[in-house]
């Protein structure tokens, strides 16, 4: 009986210690070519390879063609504001709310209100502090044109200097509770290095 208890105890301790073994963790670095002093860093399970794309003054990273083992879509958009956008999306809200020069609340408001998916989103929630580096949002899309897809979308928003928004987007089709937990952990792994 004592040998069985010792064997059970040894197996339990071994399984507990194995849970701390580092999984396939990778470091990802995202930068805008004209904002080299600021980096968005991510330590995460493998999300696959990211493709870089310059879009006028914007810069876009996407893993859509190579998603990694969790099949989670991830993109990082550095959105360069023009003069009118700086006035309308930053300076006016700042003046109305008495807010700071830079805040993740500004891109959160912009991307939430002008999302192409807004009409079909449900279960919307937001969190984070306007004076932090990031604010967050999540939403579900249960179906598109009558077809059930159970897609989860999660976002992290940040602002660089006074003229650039950062939009980090994660999504997964047929999302289960454990996938949602993984996506939240990925969002929590993003850091803004200034």
Image (tube, rainbow, N blue to C red):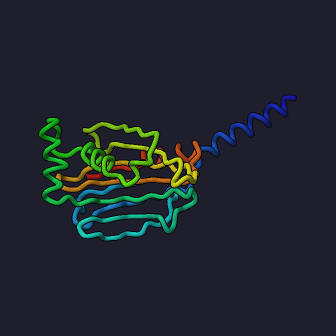
Of the pair 66 and 40, the residue shown nearer to us: 66
Query: Percent from the top left, x then y, of residue 40?
Result: 33, 55
In which quadrant of the rendered image does the N terminus lie?
top right
Of the pair 48 and 14, the residue shown nearer to us: 48
- Outermost right residue: 1
Query: Percent from the top left, x then y, of residue 48?
Result: 50, 64
User: Would you say 120 lies left or right of 158 here?
Assistant: right
- The residue shown at (28%, 63%) is 32
Number of disc labels: 0
- The residue shown at (26%, 67%) is 33
Residue 137 sits in which quadrant?
Answer: top left
Query: Percent from the top left, x then y, of residue 178?
Result: 58, 44
User: Would you say 178 lies left or right of 139 here?
Assistant: right
- Outermost front residue: 146
Of the pair 84 and 157, the residue shown nearer to us: 84
Above or below residue 92? Residue 62 is: below
User: Would you say 120 lies left or right of 98 here?
Assistant: right
Above or below residue 2? Residue 61 is: below
Query: Percent from the top left, x then y, of residue 34?
Result: 22, 65
Above or below residue 162? Residue 5 is: above
- The residue shown at (30%, 46%) is 108
Of the pair 64 and 89, the residue shown nearer to us: 89
């Amino acid at each position: 009986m004592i040998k069985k208890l010792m064997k059970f105890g040894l197996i339990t301790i071994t399984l507990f210690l194995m849970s701390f073994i580092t999984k396939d963790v990778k470091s990802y670095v995202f930068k805008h070519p004209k904002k080299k002093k600021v980096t968005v860093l991510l330590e995460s399970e493998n999300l696959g390879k990211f493709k870089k794309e310059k879009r006028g003054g914007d810069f876009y990273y996407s893993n859509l063609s190579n998603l990694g083992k969790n099949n989670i879509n991830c993109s990082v958009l550095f959105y360069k504001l023009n003069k009118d956008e700086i006035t309308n999306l930053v300076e006016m809200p700042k003046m109305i709310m008495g807010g700071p020069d830079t805040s993740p609340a500004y891109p959160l408001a912009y991307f939430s209100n002008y999302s192409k998916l807004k009409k079909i989103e449900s279960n919307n929630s937001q969190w984070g502090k306007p004076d932090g580096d990031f604010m967050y949002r999540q939403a579900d899309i249960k179906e598109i044109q009558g077809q059930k897809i159970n897609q989860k979308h999660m976002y992290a928003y940040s602002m660089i200097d006074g003229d650039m928004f950062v939009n980090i987007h994660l999504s997964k089709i047929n999302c289960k509770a454990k996938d949602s937990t993984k996506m939240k952990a990925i969002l929590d792994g993003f850091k803004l290095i200034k």
